[in-house]
Image (tube, rainbow, N blue to C red):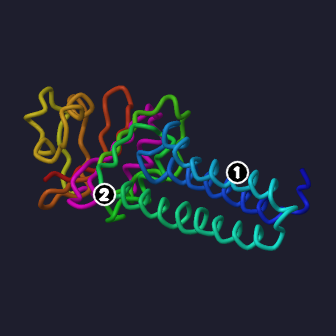
Amino acid sequence: MNNANVRYALIWLYISVSVAILQYIISQYVSWFSTLLWGLLLFIPVIFVYLIYLISSKISKHFPKSTKIITNIVDFIVVMIIQFIIIGFISLITSWAFWWDTDNIRLYHQALARTYKKERVAHFPRKIPVAKDKVIFRHKEHPWFGSGEMILSFKADKQYIDKELAKYNFVKIEGPYKYISEYYLFQFIYTGKDENIIEGAKNFMIYNYGNCAYGILISQDNIITYYSFVSD
């Protein structure tokens, strides 16, 4: 097999592999498609491009010019139109059309970036001061309706907590209360999972209006929780 005769087909194969890898990496950060199955599906066009490369290698010595023309046209359709444009567009639209729901701290900064109204998460730390395995993180939102929540919770020292609280003027400070129903914040929470984090903590509310509230919770054992709730 003389690769030099079909170098163009080999270049298309490299491009196809690069596009598939890039799409999979992006999918891990902007959607819920970051699974092995989705990665395998993204590489299906690569298989076709590889088959085209093999076929071109076989027939190029007999029909060099026509093989080059046909190979380039077919590879352009598969790689640029189907793989890059169509599959890329479907992946992008699908990832933004459904609930974005994760507790993967690796996606923390992507969750901040996805938030439509940045003021709702402006109080969240850009750098988490503890190891990631010691963090509780949840992010859930619907891109069409805007409802959802973001929670980042970890144990901190008193100096860090005092420094964080000194940054803001709070519209409401409440608690700590034993029962979730005693909190004014209760009307904003989105899921029952939030009750365990709120109960027994002191709530420093930075903002509350309409269906939105965000602020900081401090528990008695120095657990600091940044929250943002947007109810339906």
**Count of numbered circles on the image:** 2
Residue drawn where x is 36% and y is 26% of the image: 221
Q: Is residue 130 left or right of residue 139?
A: right
Residue drawn where x is 27% and y is 47% of the image: 149
Q: Is residue 147 left or right of residue 139?
A: left
- Choose top left, top right, bottom left or bottom right for residue 179: top left
- Crowding around mark 2 (Cα neighbors within 10 Å: few <14, some 14 to 19, many 20+) is few
In the foreground, 11 or 199: 11
Say what amino acid the circle numbered 1 marks. Answer: Tyr
> Which residue ends up furthest to the left in the rendered image?
181
Contact (Cβ within 8 Å) of mark 2 with mark 1? no
- Choose top left, top right, bottom left or bottom right for residue 152: top left
Helix, strand or loop status at disc 2: helix
The image shows residue 26 at horizontal and vertical percentages of 54, 54
Q: Is residue 47 left or right of residue 192?
A: right
Q: Nearer the viewer, mark 2 or mark 1?
A: 1
Q: Is residue 113 above or below residue 223?
A: below
Checking the image for residue 97, the label placed there is 2
Task: Let me know if residue 93 is in the magenta part.
Answer: no
Magenta span covers which residues? 141-170
Q: Is residue 50 above or below residue 118?
A: above
Checking the image for residue 50, the label placed there is 1
- Crowding around mark 1 (Cα neighbors within 10 Å: few <14, some 14 to 19, many 20+) is some
Say what amino acid the circle numbered 2 marks. Answer: Ala
Task: Let me know if residue 144 is in the magenta part.
Answer: yes
